[in-house]
């Protein structure tokens, strides 16, 4: 894909345009082939919400951080505890802002892919649902854009996330688009939003996250409801091709997250007065002491708990790609406990159920 980058003279607007290869699918059988899509589509119509109606006049107190140090994965590490209070507060403010910027950029990617699925998927009811997901994603972009503007700290999209979404958009196969978005990126997002909801006490962000999660839960279900029977009906060679794409997409994520600090995070360290080499040494020290960034009880590891089980359940991990995953250090977790609990309308693990939300 040849990219054309356009910037205005003030260098305040950045856009990128490239051609994609997705085929358009007309279908004059309006009944659809997957019965469960009717329920998913009806739920999507019934549970729309208006981002403009959230409490945008809620003040955000700089002395009361969006995520408190004690809720941070860094707070228990010796190097972090040695920082001054000002450095800790600045780091928390900017690292949280960088994460929220990724939510914003990722939601734009979801908007683009959902629209692509709507015109590429052959099943008419799947088109209906993909159209509702498209408006969901537009609403998410609106909400996170307004929030990032409100806190007035902006960070660029991390390279690996853009590479993952570009690879998803660059395929000519709607199944691959759904794998990249509804199973991998949406799995990543659902876990991150669940964790954010439990980490923050800032009421506006909590309400945004809660409402976005209502939509994301349906989006992840769409990937399973439609793709699982579709994949099962494919020729083994076609399944193997999709399994390879799933591996390649996960590999982009894993390599990106383990590649060290990107330019945006280096900026977080710079404004916090933290030397990058000191930061990396502190991370190494924590690892040697047995202190890791494992998530606290009740939080979710998106890759292990959601993405990999979803891929296994949909038949998108073959013996050949299982060996590939293990070769890059990604266990092929087939345990559906957490994934199914997140989908279960009665599970306490899904924060939506604790609040008696409909989704």
Image (spheres, grey):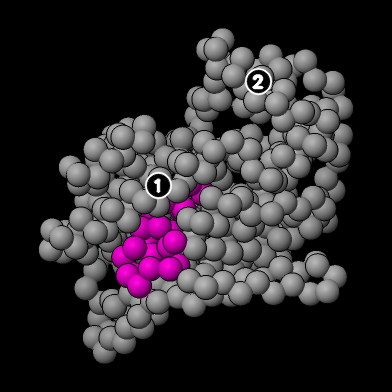
Q: Residue at x 64, y 54 (%)?
A: 157
Q: Residue at x 49, y 63 (%)?
A: 166
The quadrant in which residue 8 appears is: bottom right
**Label 1 vs label 2, nearer the camera:** 2
Picture coordinates of residue 314 (x, y %)?
Answer: 25, 52
Q: Is residue 162 left or right of residue 184?
A: right
The quadrant in which residue 251 appears is: top left
Picture coordinates of residue 135 (x, y %)?
Answer: 54, 71
Considering only vertical position in the picture, is 165 above or below 354?
below
CA gap, disc 1 to disc 2? 27 Å
Q: Secondary structure at mark 2?
A: helix
Task: Say if residue 141 shows up in the picture.
Answer: yes
The quadrant in which residue 203 appears is: top right
- Name the residue beneath numbered marker 2: 281
- Name the residue beneath numbered marker 1: 250
Q: Is residue 152 or residue 274 the one in the foreground?
A: 274
Residue with the most extreme top position? 289
| Highlighted range, magenta | 167-189
């Amino acid at each position: 894909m040849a990219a054309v980058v356009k910037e205005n003279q003030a260098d305040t607007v950045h856009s990128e345009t490239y051609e994609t290869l997705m085929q358009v699918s007309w279908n004059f059988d309006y009944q659809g082939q997957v019965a469960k899509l009717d329920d998913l589509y009806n739920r999507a119509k019934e549970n729309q919400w208006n981002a403009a109606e959230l409490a945008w006049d809620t003040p955000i107190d700089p002395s009361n951080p969006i995520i408190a140090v004690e809720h941070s994965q860094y707070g228990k590490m010796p190097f972090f505890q040695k920082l001054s209070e000002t450095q800790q507060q600045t780091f928390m403010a900017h690292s949280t802002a960088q994460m929220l910027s990724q939510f914003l950029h990722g939601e734009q990617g979801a908007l683009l892919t959902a629209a692509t699925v709507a015109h590429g998927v052959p099943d008419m009811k799947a088109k209906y649902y993909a159209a509702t997901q498209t408006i969901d994603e537009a609403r998410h972009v609106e909400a996170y854009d307004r929030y990032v503007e409100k806190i007035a700290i902006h960070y660029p999209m991390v390279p690996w996330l853009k590479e993952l979404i570009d690879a998803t958009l660059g395929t000519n196969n709607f199944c691959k688009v759904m794998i990249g978005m509804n199973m991998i990126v949406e799995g990543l997002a659902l876990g991150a939003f669940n964790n954010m909801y439990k980490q923050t006490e800032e009421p506006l962000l909590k309400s945004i996250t809660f409402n976005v999660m209502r939509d994301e839960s349906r989006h992840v279900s769409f990937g399973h409801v439609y793709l699982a029977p579709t994949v099962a009906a494919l020729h083994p060679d076609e399944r193997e091709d999709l399994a390879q794409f799933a591996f390649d997409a996960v590999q982009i994520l894993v390599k990106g997250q383990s590649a060290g600090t990107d330019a945006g995070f280096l900026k977080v360290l710079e404004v916090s007065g933290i030397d990058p080499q000191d930061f990396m040494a502190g991370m190494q020290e924590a690892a040697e002491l047995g202190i890791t960034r494992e998530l606290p009880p009740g939080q979710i590891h998106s890759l292990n708990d959601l993405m990999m089980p979803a891929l296994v359940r949909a038949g998108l991990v073959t013996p050949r790609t299982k060996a590939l995953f293990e070769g890059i250090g990604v266990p092929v977790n087939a345990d559906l406990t957490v994934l199914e609990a997140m989908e279960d309308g009665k599970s306490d693990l899904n924060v939506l159920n604790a609040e008696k939300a409909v989704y």
